[in-house]
Amino acid sequence: MSTAVLEGQPTAPAEVPSFTATLIIRRYDPEVDAEPYWQDFDVTMHGTDRVLDALHKIKWEQDGSLSFRRSCAHGVCGSDAMRINGRNRLACKTLLKDLDLSKPIYVEAIKGLPLEKDLIVDMDPFFESYKSIQPFLIASSKPEKERIQSVAQRARFDETTKCILCAACTSSCPVFWTDGQYFGPAAIVNAHRFIFDSRDEGAQVRLDILNDKEGVWRCRTTFNCTDACPRGIEVTKAIAEVKAAIIRGKA
């Protein structure tokens, strides 16, 4: 009987090559540790794996006490923001193969927010700043149908609707690290989303809130926030547009 492969017959998938990645994770358990410390793990991974996959493998196979947040694993929920090799990223969007695997991968919690455990920080201060800019539509009218916008009107604020509140931009800001009262880039971005929305009537309220020493004027334009945003939002540009609106006295 012939062993030749018949034309059109599916073949077995090629074996995906694997490699060993070393992750050095900054650990902290407030119940037993006086200070955070670094711990290294070696894991066997594949080219399509992400940092989140490596963290899962460590937690499930090596150390079940490793703590981190994650949910959708597709760059939408924003819950797995962390510092990877010194840069704020989403673990679910960072492919291991895009990192220098000849060196260890350093993973730690984002900065500027209180550390709770391992890679988990207290997000309450971040969300308090977000809530303070009134991130919702303010309108007195009650139309029977949808509020119509032109393409140009929608485009005016379209980019800042992409924010997923991951805090990657805010926790990459040196001003935020040193000044706990600063609103931070994410809050200003979400204010921008409503300030320039033609359907909204609360622009001046938000401009007054941000026209403060802890508001937009605390920004030092370092561009860290823009570089950190996993959604590609030009955060520094949005902050500059809010500054300009304050100077003009209107959106």
Image (tube, rainbow, N blue to C red):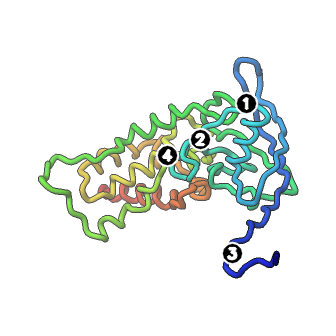
Farthest-out residue, left: 144
Q: Which mark is residue 9?
A: 3
Dot 2: few (<14), some (14–19), or many (≥20) neighbours within 10 Å?
some
* Residue name at image x 25 percent, y 46 percent: 138
* Residue name at image x 74 percent, y 42 percent: 57
Against 164, is 48 above or below?
A: below
CB within 8 Å, label 3 to label 4: no
In the figure, is residue 1 to the left or right of 221? right
Q: Which mark is residue 64?
A: 1
Determine the secondary structure under disc 1. Answer: loop
Lower position in the chain sequence, tag 3 or tag 4: 3
Lower position in the chain sequence, tag 2 or tag 4: 2
Lower position in the chain sequence, tag 2 or tag 1: 1
Against 103, is 63 above or below?
A: above
Determine the secondary structure under disc 4. Answer: loop
Q: Which mark is residue 147?
A: none
The Cα–Cα distance between marks 2 and 4, rounded to whole angstroms, is 13 Å
Q: Which residue is mark 2?
A: 70
Nearest to the eye among marks 2 and 1: give it. 1
Nearest to the eye among marks 3 and 2: give it. 3
Q: Which residue is mark 4?
A: 165
Farthest-out residue, front: 1
The Cα–Cα distance between marks 3 and 1, rounded to whole angstroms, is 43 Å
